[in-house]
Image (tube, helix red, strand yellow):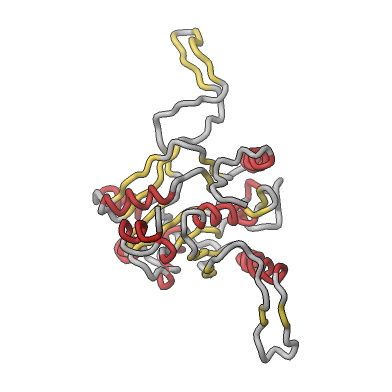
Amino acid sequence: MTAADQTATTGVPVSEIPVVILCGGMGTRLREASEQLPKGLVDVGGRPILWHIMKLYSSHGFRKFVLCLGYKGDMIKSYFLDSRVRSSDLTLHTNGSKPLEFHTDTSDEDWEITFVETGLTTATGARIARAAKYLDAPRFALTYGDGIGSVDVSTALEQHVASGKTGTLTGVHPSGRYGEMQVEGDSVKEFNEKPTTQTDYVNGGFFFFERSFVEGYLDADRTEEMLEHAPLGRLARDGELGVYKHEGYWLGMDTFRDWKELNGLWDAGRAEWKTWKD
């Protein structure tokens, strides 16, 4: 889809739609992978999981990111600031009267990143509300800083706009963790080590919301309110929550096992979420 087609479909250039990423988590169940990093900086194939998520969106034309920070947010800021410093020729004025002068920039990404300090223990609903002043378009994308998949976010956006609903979430099939059995009486009639077909969907993130969702359903002062509880529940009851059904690969990186799976797929050249070219 061309940039003109995207604008005609969405009412605003995709490059101007903010992508909000909730990356304030501690990653307590990932201590084997890294005990000192915020979850978004945990490494997959030599890059943070957060970078992979941003690359997925940017491969579809998104370039404005709003990072909702919490636990060790300064490390996330430093990662992106330092990556530009490492890749560029620059001049430093040590008396502090002038900013850094960048003479070259070899980065492959043309991203605009806004870092928002949303609180150490703030729940997801309030984090989004606290970033509201940076959401300067009719709608915005939202995702978690630890879930990745081969999600066609362009098609999800088109469906969201066409639906006329306030919100759209991506429904995914969670990967099978245990052997699936079909049982009759005391006998196992069929056993699949890794189930290949599932009928139920779970929330995989990769949302799109109209800007009105923030004022109508969220409150920055309700620091314990999770997006996934009252706000989405009310939105669904109001008939304003749609679902984009994703049938491909998706994984939420919650455990050390998940981290190993993602790295194994990347190392084997089978990372289905890699929708960009090197």
Q: In x, y percent, where is residue 50?
A: 58, 55
- Identify the residue shown where x is 58% and y is 63%: 109
- Identify the residue shown where x is 55% and y is 60%: 24
Give the quarter of the image for residue 257. Answer: top right
Give the quarter of the image for residue 193. Answer: top right
Q: Is 175 above or below relative to 97?
A: above
Q: In x, y percent, where is residue 160?
A: 32, 51
Q: In x, y percent, where is residue 244?
A: 37, 44
Q: Is 125 above or below relative to 170?
A: below
- Identify the residue shown where x is 63% and y is 58%: 38
Work out which residue is located at the far right of the displayed protein and give it: 94
Q: Is 141 above or below relative to 32?
A: below
- Identify the residue shown where x is 53% and y is 30%: 176
Q: Is 165 above or below relative to 138?
A: above
Q: In x, y percent, where is residue 186?
A: 49, 8
Q: Is residue 26 visible?
A: no
Q: Is residue 27 visible?
A: yes
Q: How many marks?
A: 0
Q: Nearer the viewer, residue 147 or 256?
A: 147
